Amino acid sequence: MRGRLVAPTRRGVLTALGGGLFAACLGAGPARAEGEIRITHAFGETVLPGAARRVVSLGFTTQDTLLALGVVPLAVRGWFGDQPHSVWPWAQPLLGGAEPQVILGEVAMETVAALRPDLVVAIGSGVSEAEYAVLSQIAPTLMHDARHSGYGTPWDEMTRTIARAVGREALGEERIASTSGAFAEARARHPEWAARTGVAAYHFGGDTGAFASGDTRGRFLAELGFRSPATIETLAAGNFFAALSPEDLAPLDVDLLVWVSSQDAVPDLAALPMRKLLTAHREGREVMAGSLVAAAMSFGSVLSLPFALRELEADIAAALDGTPATPVASAVRAGLAP
């Protein structure tokens, strides 16, 4: 698992797979050496001889966690949004002027190998077991824990796991405590939120739906004390979202309705007829998370969550102050206010 291919060709990679590379990858390793780090996950066990320094970030959001830990990745995986080096504003200052390579689309093993990493972070990357087997021959590769889906690792657990791999566990705990503390302080400022239901919803390309509690956007509201209604969880049926009919938005009639969009202008949502029948709309309990805030909620990282909280707390408080006439700034800007 700690071997390295300096410059593998695509043909060579496929040949290695055919020769049983995966089985070799998961075979029993040597006895634990001093300073060795072992991390088990869904595809086996990753073994590092010591704290990693040269890291490639293949998870769609793991660049945030690495930067929070003071590790600038050699390369990051592009997800969405036209951001420099695929790093968003809440994390950009931590680059310190570095310019990591951006890997778009499918992972090219030759590209990863050419960077000569001593760790590949592939939590939340969509990498298959076969791809993991190849990556593990390039460098020790981290995957998600078997308890979670490929994209379902909670932000705090991801932070702890990566912190172990890069030898910065104390800093990881500090980062976790800071982010957890920000949400705890918000809950203390608004204890009444714990008795309320909240949903993060979307309307895009004619499709309307809501994110379930296991999704990063649902978890954001849960961190603030809101409960996801049972109807949404049932409709999601274990998926990360529940698809709804634009003709029946009743499941969205909750105490707090946060619309999440990759756009700041949402004329289709503003004109959605059935939305205007929701009590949440009539009573001014809608909040708009536009492109930047929606991205922060979608990343759901140790860095992006406090950013989203700072942007949304005042609007959520305005939406739930019991006075329908109180303007909710984000909803007003988006044309969603009653």
Image (cartoon, helix red, strand yellow):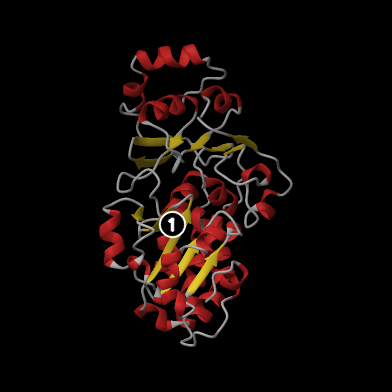
Q: Position of residue 165 (x, y in %)?
A: 48, 44
* Nearest to the observer: residue 328 or residue 179: 328
| Coordinates of residue 289 in the picture (x, y in percent) | 54, 63
Amino acid residing under circle 1: Thr
Q: Is residue 325 above or below residue 247?
A: below
Residue 167 higher or lower than 119, as above or below:
below
Q: Quadrant of the N terminus?
A: top left
Check disc 1: other Cα within 10 Å, few if <14, some if 14-19, many if 20+: many
Quarter-of-image position of residue 19: top left
Which sits in the foreground, 57 or 139?
57
The vertical placement of 306 against 100, above or below, is below
Answer with the quarter of the image where residue 233 lies: bottom left
Q: Is residue 50 left or right of residue 85?
A: left
The residue sitting at 47% across, 67% down in the picture is 258
Q: Is residue 224 visible?
A: no
Which residue appears at 43% of the width and 57% of the height? 216
Where is residue 79 drawn, in percent x and y? Answer: 54, 42
